[in-house]
Image (tube, rainbow, N blue to C red):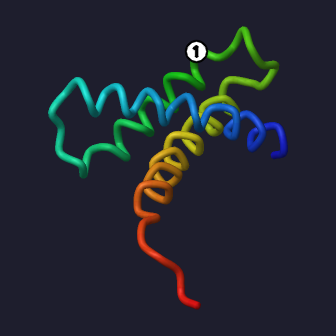
Amino acid sequence: MENILFFATVLVPIITALVQVVKSTVALPKTLLPLIALIIGLAIGFLASPFTDLTFDLRLWAGGIAGLASVGFFELGNKRTGTTKE
C-alpha cells in the first residue's frame, strides 16, 4: 500500500501538468476533466513499468489515484483566493 501511495505522489504533478496541456490545447467541457485526468493517470501507470517494480495492477491503481488526486490538487490551489478569518 505504501508503494502505491508513494508512486501516486510522484505521478500527481506530472498528471496535473498533462491535464493543463490538454485543457489549453483542446476545448473541452470542464466536467470532463476528471475523466481525462483518470485516463491520463491510468496511461502513465501503464507505461511506467521501466521505472518501478510494482505489478501491473498496482501501477494502474496508483495511476488512477494520482489522476483523480491531480484534479483535486489543482482545484484546491486554484480556489484558494481571498482572506482568512481573523
| Residue assigned mark 1 | 47
The residue lying at 47 percent from left, 77 percent from top is 83
The residue lying at 42 percent from left, 72 percent from top is 82
The residue lying at 37 percent from left, 47 percent from top is 34
Q: Residue 49: image x %, image y %? A: 69, 14
> What is the residue that sits farthest to the top in this orientation?
50
Residue nearest the viewer, comparing 68 with 16: 16
Residue nearest the viewer, comparing 83 with 41: 83
Relative to 24, 34 lies left or right? right
Q: Amino acid at mark 1?
A: Leu
Above-or-below relation of 64 to 18: below
Under circle 1, the secondary element is: helix
Give the total number of marks visible in the rendering.
1
Above-or-below relation of 21 to 72: above
The residue lying at 42 percent from left, 66 percent from top is 81
Above-or-below relation of 35 to 41: below
Relative to 10, 64 lies left or right? left
Residue nearest the viewer, comparing 25 with 60: 25
Q: Residue 26: image x %, image y %? A: 19, 27
Which of the image's four quarters has the C terminus?
bottom right
Mark 1 surroundings: few (<14), some (14-19) or many (≥20) residues within 10 A: some
Above-or-below relation of 22 to 85: above
Q: Residue 52: image x %, image y %? A: 77, 19
Relative to 57, 18 lies left or right? left
